[in-house]
Amino acid sequence: MNKIKKWKLGLVMAAVLMLMLPAGTGSAAPVLEEVPFPMDSSNQAGWWSPLATYGLGYEYAYMAYNAPGTIAGKHTVAIARRDNDGIWSKLPLMNGTVPAEYLDDLGHNQPSMARDGSGRFHVFASMHSNPWQYFRSDTVGGIPQNHSDELPLGMTVTYPVLTTAPNGDLYLMVRIDKDPAGKREAVLFRWNNAESVWTQVKVIAAHLNRSVYPDDLVFDANGDLHILFEWAYFAASPLRHQLSYLKYSPSTGIFSKADGTTVSAPVSLTTADIVQPLAPGEAYVQSGSDPGGPGVQSAKMTLDTLGRPVIAYRYREESATSFSVKLATYGTGGWTLQTVYNAAPTTAAIDVTWAGNAARIYYVKSSGSDRAFMAVNTGGGWTETSLAPGIPVERLAVDRSPKGIDILYLVDVTNLKLYYGRNN
């Protein structure tokens, strides 16, 4: 499709599909716009980082997603790019001249992406105990090509999450899956943007008979990396425990807890900074399905104005049958935990941003005509705002743009649609 057709399509879609929604507390009315490209039903995860934004005087959004494959049960992968003028273009991931195509695998084979300081796109796609499936633009803003051979051979990986450092480097956290010792470790990698090369930083979390589940990576203004992850019984379980935090300073190579205490990597369950401790009746269980009982499922992180971690996560309390939406903040007294929402079941989709002087918690309810919500503490309690009335959103991601706007990535699996949103 040429640029003129893309421009016309962008205008038509914006005019027809733009939705004005109720205003959230402390924000203007969010605006949604349907991404004008087909989406595959497999485009749904809770751990991923499929959204990146760029530009201060202008604004670009990059949305990595699973697109339909050549047959049912398979998908291709692409980036939907929205430029400053609202014009959409599609950048497919390519194996040479052939689109990259993979088997569907809900909760695992979904993409994460980031843009480096030179403007190249990096996408990690469709890995569930698979060798690397890594794609990068060879030119600034270009079509991503397969560069999997540039990462260490012999590794099988799952749950890639990545972010861009203030200096334009990238940092990637993945779970390494094959370990005969009975553990699945979290490993941190760095993309040196100046030298265009990936290196392994370190194994950052490991414990015998446990598997690490990556959640999030966030940089602060000082160039330090904040890391979030969960633990499950080896080899796997959809119910995880002991949500953990770790801070890494690339300039010094030091790992530390939220209180500044230095720790050695990899951290274990005896040395990790535990955000959500085990409840009295909470236990590790290896299970291919949800074993019930208390535990964690999905978590994301942002930073407050002082650079302290602010964590949104889903936790099923003892005797509960569904997951509450929780918030963890760090202060002089340590971790403070509070419940944001627990009135109805939610899905494994959550995110959080910091706007002004308050956290915005994004979550999705399992049923109802309105499913995607944002909650803000107004001083007298949490006030929620519907983000997409009438749209059966099942998954989401949110990124606060350099212009200070929450960019929304909303997935409607029922109708196979992906939505872009702006929440001022």
Image (cartoon, helix red, strand yellow):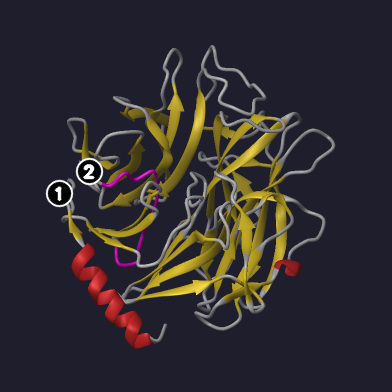
**Front one among 87 and 210:** 87
Q: Picture coordinates of residue 157 (x, y %)?
A: 70, 50
**Residue toward you, 269 or 82:** 82
Image coordinates for residue 230, horizontal then vertical, percent:
57, 36
How packed mark 1 is, by other alpha carbons closer than 10 Å (few <14, some 14-19, many 20 or more), is some
Mark 2 = which residue?
386
Q: Quarter of the image for the C terminus: give it.
A: bottom left
State which quadrant residue 257 falls in: top right
In the picture shown, does residue 52 fall above or below 173? below
What is the three-letter code of the residue carrying label 2?
Answer: Ser
Q: Judge the density around disc 2: few (<14), some (14-19), many (≥20) Cα neighbours within 10 Å.
A: some
Quadrant in which the N terminus appears: bottom left
Residue occupying the point 83% across, 35% down: 181
Please say if the residues under marks 2 and 1 sit with CB atoms less than 8 Å apart. Answer: yes
Q: Residue shown at 51%/30% (left/top)?
A: 296
* Quadrant in which residue 256 is drawn: top right
- Magenta span has 402? yes
Q: Which mark is residue 22?
A: 1
Q: Secondary structure at mark 1?
A: loop
Gap between marks 2 and 1, in whole Å? 7 Å
On the question of residue 164 being in view, the answer is no
- Near-viewer residue (86 or 38): 38
The span picked out in magenta is: 391-404
| Disc with the residue nearer the chain's start (2 vs 1) | 1
| Label 2: which secondary element | strand
Residue 303 seen: yes
Image position, residue 265 (x, y; %)? 70, 44
Q: Residue at x 40, y 42 (%)?
A: 350
Residue 101 vs residue 336, the one in the foreground: 101
